[in-house]
Image (cartoon, grey):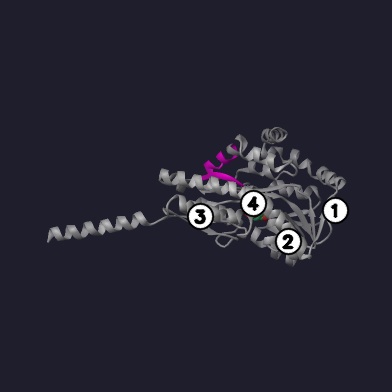
């Protein structure tokens, strides 16, 4: 009788182990943009690569368009371990207490995409990701979107055109200062709330790269879009540190490889996506698209550049100087 009980117990344990061994490690990847955006497509590509490279030991569940969590909530969910991976805008790390990330929001700080990549792919970018560790977050990569344009329901040709406008921004004190430098009233809203806020007049205008504007249909509720390229919007791909450190070493190595390939893919499509979105906005014909001339560009720069000095105490003068040096090369 005893032997029989032992055999039954052993068989149960073996089947449990087998079941456990087959149960995939689940990565919930939450983000706030549509799938047909650079970040949305890269999340899908990471899913495909991660599941293939770990031979199914990892299952990635992508939750796009604020389906699972919207802006502020998603960072809290990651720290609590309710989700394992995010790719928030670099403008959204201030509330976490890592104010240095707002250096990416400084208007006109990156003359070109190449100069931006020299920052994100070099020691400055690495150093910033390391600042996330004490918050229980591991930074894996930087993903790209593009340079931002401004939209409203009135023409935006000169800085004075912003006076008194309620402009939606991401949760960044640098963007707050940027809009105030233009005489506008900045209002932080979650990305998922922007379309309705523009439609109902809660805010008058906003800023974003064309891919975000088009995929959220903002062009349908904004009569004017000015191609200003006055600032940059990009992302940090981050994971819950406890989850990441707890992975089997071979699984983590495979995921790092999948992330590297997904990052290369994402950067290759970002500019194309934005170009296609701008063309689609023009084709839709609901928004007057205006390109600033050189004189107007200079006026916008003059109005917004004081934000750099103003934000030194928040971001760190040394970090700003290091980026000036790196991007001047
Ligand atoms: C925004 O909130 O405007 C953007 O950060 C959304 C995104 O993730 O691109």
Say few, some or many: other residues with alpha carbon within 10 Å of mark 1 (under 14 / 14 to 19 / 20 or more).
Answer: many
Q: Earlier in the sequence, mark 4 or mark 3?
A: 3
Locate residue 190, reporting x and y percent. Answer: 65, 58
Name the residue located 62 percent from the left edge and 36 percent from the top edge. Answer: 124
Which is in the foreground here, disc 1 or disc 4? 4
Query: Which element is circle 3 on?
Result: helix
* Residue 231 appears in view: yes
Q: Nearer the viewer, residue 107 or 288?
A: 288
Q: Which residues are magenta?
A: 127-143
Using the numbered discs, state the Cα–Cα distance from disc 1 to disc 2 in whole angstroms. Answer: 22 Å
Say the numbered circle drawn on residue 269.
Answer: 4
Pointers 4 and 2 in contact (C-beta within 8 Å)? no
Cα separation between marks 2 and 3: 28 Å
Residue 274 drawn above or below residue 246: below
Q: Secondary structure at mark 1?
A: loop
Q: Could you classify mark 2 by the number of other residues whose Cα lies within 10 Å: few (under 14), some (14-19), or many (20 or more)?
A: some
User: Is residue 203 visible from the viewing direction of this image?
Assistant: no
Residue 257: numbered disc = none
215 relative position to 8: left or right: right
Which one is earlier in the sequence, the residue at label 1 or at label 4?
1
Question: Where does the C terminus fall, quadrant-wise?
Answer: top right
């Amino acid at each position: 009788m005893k032997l029989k009980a032992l055999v039954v117990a052993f068989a149960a344990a073996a089947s449990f182990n087998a079941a456990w061994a087959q149960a995939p490690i689940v990565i919930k990847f939450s983000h706030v943009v549509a799938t047909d955006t650079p970040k949305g497509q890269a999340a899908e590509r990471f899913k495909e690569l991660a599941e293939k490279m770990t031979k199914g030991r990892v299952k990635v569940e992508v939750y796009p368009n604020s389906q699972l969590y919207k802006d502020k909530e998603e960072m809290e969910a990651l720290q609590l371990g309710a989700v394992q991976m995010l790719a928030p805008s670099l403008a959204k790390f201030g509330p976490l207490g890592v104010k240095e990330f707002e250096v990416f929001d400084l208007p006109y700080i990156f003359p070109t995409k190449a100069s931006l990549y020299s920052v994100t792919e070099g020691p400055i970018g690495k150093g910033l990701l390391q600042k996330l560790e004490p918050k229980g977050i591991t930074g894996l990569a930087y993903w790209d979107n593009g340079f931002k344009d401004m939209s409203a329901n009135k023409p935006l040709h000169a800085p004075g055109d912003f006076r008194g406008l309620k402009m939606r921004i991401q949760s960044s004190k640098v963007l707050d200062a940027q809009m105030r430098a233009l005489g506008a009233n900045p209002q932080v809203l979650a990305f998922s709330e922007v379309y309705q806020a523009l439609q109902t007049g809660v805010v008058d205008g906003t800023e974003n790269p064309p891919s975000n504007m088009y995929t959220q249909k903002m062009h349908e509720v904004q009569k004017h879009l000015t191609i200003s390229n006055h600032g940059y919007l990009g992302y940090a791909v981050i994971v819950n540190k406890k989850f990441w450190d707890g992975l089997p070493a071979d699984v983590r190595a495979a995921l790092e490889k999948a992330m590297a390939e997904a990052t290369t893919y994402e950067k290759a499509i970002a500019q194309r996506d934005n170009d296609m979105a701008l063309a689609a906005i023009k084709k839709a014909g609901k928004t007057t698209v205006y390109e600033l001339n050189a004189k107007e560009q200079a006026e916008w720069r003059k109005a917004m550049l004081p934000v750099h000095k103003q934000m030194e105490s928040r971001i760190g003068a040394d970090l700003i100087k290091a980026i000036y040096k790196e991007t001047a090369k």
